[in-house]
Amino acid sequence: MKGKSIRRLFYYVFITGLSVHFSAAMGAEDCPFTKIYPSLDKAYHECNNGYLNGSCESFVKNLAILLPNYNCHRGADHSYTIPAIWLAGAAAEDFYDMLYALASTKKMYADRGYKSAREAAKKLFLSNEFRAVLDGDVAEDFMPRIKAMEKVKTKDQ
C-alpha cells in the first residue's frame, strides 16, 4: 500500500508539473512582442525614412498593440507582467520619439500623405495607454511634451 501511495504522489507531482509548465508555455503566447515587433521595427524604419506606403500608419497601429500589459516578462523576473513594448529595450524610446514626431507634425510629416498617421499618432500619444508605459527618465522626458500638446489641443478646440 505504501508503494502505491508513493507512486500516486509521484504521478500527481509529475502531472501537476507538466500542467504548470504547459500553462506557462501557453501564457507566453499572450505576449504579442515576438509576433508584432518585426512589423513595428520595419514600419518604424520606413516611416522614419519618409516612405508614403502606409508604414507610418502601421507603425502607430503596431505600437498601440504593444502598449498594454500582457503576460510578458523581462529576464529572470517572472513575478510581474509588463507592457510588451518594454521588451524592446532602448528601442522603445526611439519608437516614442517617432510617435511624438508624427503627433506634433514635425516638418517631415507635414505632407498631406501623412494625415491619417498624424491623427492616429496624436490620439495614441495623448492616450492613457501611452502614459502608462512611461516611467523614470522616459516619463520625465515625455510628460512635458504630452502636457504641451494637450494645451495646444485645448486652444485649437
Image (tube, rainbow, N blue to C red):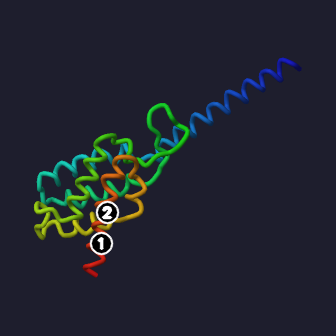
* Image quadrant in which the C terminus is located: bottom left
Total labels: the figure holds 2
Query: Measured along the vertical axis of the image, is residue 7 above or below residue 141?
Result: above
Residue 98 position within the rendered picture, expressed as x and y whole percent measured from the top left? 22, 54
Q: Position of residue 32 (x, y in %)?
A: 40, 48
Q: CA distance from mark 1 to mark 2?
A: 9 Å
Q: Is residue 1 left or right of residue 50?
A: right
Instruction: Name the residue tied to disc 2.
Output: 146
Mark 1 secondary-structure assignment = helix
Which residue occupies the extreme bottom position in the image? 157
Q: Is residue 2 left or right of residue 66?
A: right
Amino acid carrying label 2: it is Ile
**Residue 110: mark in rendering:** none
N-terminal of the pair, mark 1 or mark 2, is 2
At a point 36% along the width and 45% down the height, the residue shown is 35
User: Which residue: 78% across, 26% down?
Assistant: 8
The answer to whether 52 is drawn above or below residue 35 in the figure is below
Q: Is 58 situated above or below 22?
A: below
- Secondary structure at badge 2 equals helix
Amino acid type shown at disc 1: Lys
Quadrant of the rendered structure where residue 3 is?
A: top right
Q: Circle 1: is it few (<14), some (14-19), or many (20+) Cα within 10 Å?
A: few
Camera-side residue: 127 or 41? 127
Q: Which mark is residue 151?
A: 1
**Depth order, front residue of 19/139:** 139
